[in-house]
Amino acid sequence: MNGVVALEQASDLAAFGAKAVSLGQALRDGLPVPPGFALSGTFVEAVAAADDAAIAELVREVAPLAGPLAVRSSAIDEDGAAASFAGQHQTLLNVPSVGELAEALREIWWSANSDAAITYRKKVGLFSRPSVGVVVQKLLAPDTAGVLFTRNPINGADVRVIEASWGLGEAVVAGLVIPDHVCLSRQGQVRERQAGYKTVAIRPVAGGGTVEEELPAELVERFCLDERQLEALNQLAGRCEQVFGPGRDLEWAFEGGTLHLLQCRAITTAGA
């Protein structure tokens, strides 16, 4: 099996991990996932070990993506039934080019094999040696991003729960802001809407990496999603449930008015 495949071809869970396989399925079903590549756990380990042939293959195969990249772990047992590994492995945003990708893979591999990651695995009863696949996609520079639960993750209520902020979604995922909070019915009617307190946005910077940008006062409590965007998110939630089943946890981003799906996994919190 090839160690590098187009993301829509990723279907082997044992080789590429849950995140890559989920995004591959989403692409095959026409969901708006940014194109990219899936790298197998074996291939990532070879690159991390400075295997010249693997590094050459990496550069050759991923070259079509060109510009800044988003590099995310897809651990082989990540997002599985035994435990949620959200936050246990590294995501690298704004890797400047394919030339810097090998070093990014090394960082992700070492993150998966860190003392903290190993301790977490033991805590949840996983004692096997970790294997980590990787998803590589062209970096988005979103205006707005966040998360969406297709049902309430706390009590299981049949509503869409959306949390949103300005810039990259990492501000929401990492808890750097109090995001806007919106609940929608399945028909898209707003059931609840609370403005957040969004003092910073995560933005890509020239030369690689990201920065926390302080937001102007007029954006701190302004809703960052309009009615059209809420409708698009509700439609995306419905499509994801058609493809994957009920109870989904999505990460999404709007860039230039276009909605992108960045992750779709089962809700793992109470009430799912």
Image (cartoon, rainbow, N blue to C red):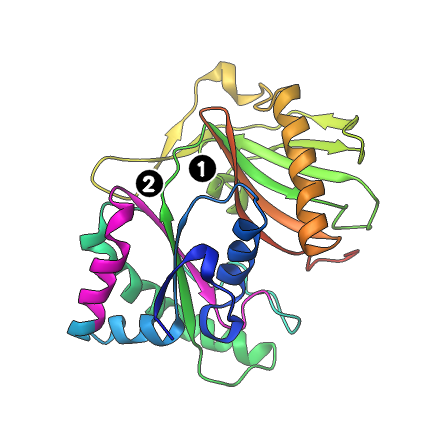
- Disc 2 or 1, which lies upstream in sequence? 1
Residue 81 picture quarter: bottom right
> Is the residue marked by circle 2 packed among few (<14), some (14-19), or many (20+) residues within 10 Å?
some
Q: Nearer the viewer, residue 162 or 114?
A: 162
As drawn, 179 above or below 245: above
Q: Residues within 10 Å of mark 1 (few under 14, many from 20)?
A: many
Q: Which of 78 and 9 is in front in this view?
A: 9
Which residue is label 2 attached to?
210
Q: Do the residues labelled 2 and 1 touch (CB within 8 Å)?
A: yes
CA gap between label 2 and label 1 equals 9 Å
Q: Position of residue 270 (x, y in %)?
A: 76, 58
Q: Identify residue type, mark 1.
A: Leu
In the picture, measured across the screen, residue 81 lies left or right of residue 5, that is: right
Number of numbered tags placed on the structure image: 2
Amino acid type of the residue tagged 2 in the rendering: Thr
Q: Is residue 93 visible?
A: no
Tell me the residue that label 1 is attached to: 168
Q: Which residue is drawn at 64% across and 38% down?
A: 236
Q: In this view, does 193 lie above or below 56?
A: above
Q: Give the magenta range.
A: 54-79
